[in-house]
Image: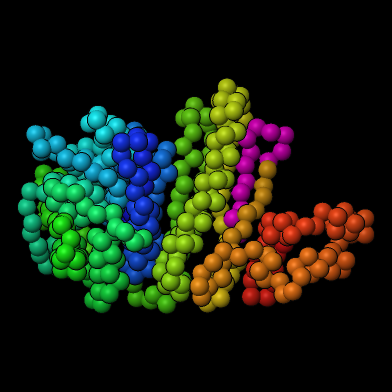
Amino acid sequence: MDKIIAIAIDEYKSQEISNLKNCLNDINSLIGVLTEKYFNDPDLILYHKPEQTTLSFLYNNLNQEMINALDNDTVLVIFAGHGDYNEYLKTNYWYCSDSDSNDPTTWFNLRDLMDFFTASKAKHIALISDSCFSGAIFESIRGGGINALVKSKSRQALTSGGIEKVSDGVAKNSPFNIALVQVLSSYDKQELTFNTLSEETIRNFREDLRQTPQFGTLSHTGDEGGTYIFRRKQDNKKLTISEISLPLDIDPKIKIEADCKLPFFSETNHSQSNFINIYVQQLGYSIINEVRKFMVDDIDYAIKSSKEIGFDFQISYKIMRDDKNYLSILIEVGQSLGTAYPNYWVETLNFSFNPVRKIQLGDLLDGNAKETIENIIDKYAESECKAVLKNSLTYELINDLEFSITDKSIFL
């Protein structure tokens, strides 16, 4: 199985650590090109919310992911965020969302990550780290050919710099991310080795910047001379949709079956999938946050009731329309949290292209949207409901209506 674990940290709790602007954009850009051109339905995990990027959360989850990997798995870990370096210990770190810049015990020690790599059974593990001082993890650089390298285990990394500060970028992506995505997008051969990716990224990196990307083998982590390989898909013409699993991340004493999956769109038919992905992720987390709030408001009830009857929470989705003009997504939510009846509802997201923008129902209706809906009420509503519906109909309500579209119909 191909697994991608992506970590983006733009927001930091400590006021002494400056927030970043482009980490989530960088991660989404990179995941977009990888799922478009190289991966067929990877197991994709994205951590970017403050509660998902604490030291405790990242340590426990990265440890579990590596320990549970199987012999034939490939794992790509991607990080974008702040980093630091201890010159006395010769050790580099990631800042987590809850890190204190004056307390190294609150930083993620990259030696721990190397230990996770060492313990993992995965065939190939690669790390791409866009953070300050990230190059301190290397001891050497080497290369090799596909036939000799694909059979043996590999542990490799590409970082945005050596033992130095690196740029977050003034535009929407960092300089390192721009060069990396450019190589992945334009490479035209069937197989792209991690070494070639690294070399081409350095070659395409801007010469006027005061940082130099680094790459190499992660020594003493189980590397046996192999290499991580990106293989191009045979057909990239259709829209590629991967899935992201969102963690519920609640008190472990609450017994709940949860499965929260949302779509992730790559750069194929449409040029601004980052815009769409951010909207999808925001909606997903807003739904999850309501469930978290319900649990926190009465934690004793949640723990007791969930043990007695079991809780269930599901988020799934359907793509109603995807063409050169529109993308329509139906998000289906179901929950059973100890109330008298299960609760089911839908949320919708709709986008138009050229340029990409989120649309409301009024954007689809020619002329007076209120008049159009009133005509629909007159034609289709039950007689006793017509007056109530019309009295409740305002411009705001029209644009708050959930709707999805196909090429032949509109669902309200």
Q: How is the image coloured?
A: rainbow
Q: Is residue 301 left or right of residue 205?
A: right
Which residue: 22% across, 68% down? 192
Quadrant where the C terminus sits is bottom right
Which residue: 44% across, 53% down? 244
Figure quadrant of residue 243: bottom left
Residue farthest along the right direction in this orientation: 383
Residue 358 vs residue 138, the one in the foreground: 358
Figure quadrant of residue 17: top left
Can you see residue 92?
yes
- How far across and how far down the image is residue 201, in percent? 20, 65
- How far across and how far down the image is residue 164, in percent? 15, 49
- How far across and how far down the image is residue 104, in percent? 22, 31
Residue 15 vs residue 46, the one in the foreground: 15
Q: Is residue 267 left or right of residue 258?
A: left
Q: Is residue 251 above or below residue 155?
A: above
Q: Is residue 407 left or right of residue 204?
A: right
Q: Is residue 28 above or below residue 342?
A: below
Question: Magenta span has 346?
Answer: no
Quadrant where the N terminus sits is bottom left
Which residue: 42% across, 38% down? 51
- How far across and how far down the image is residue 72, in percent? 27, 54
The range drawn in magenta is 330-342
State the count of labels: 0
Can you see residue 42?
no
Figure quadrant of residue 82: top left
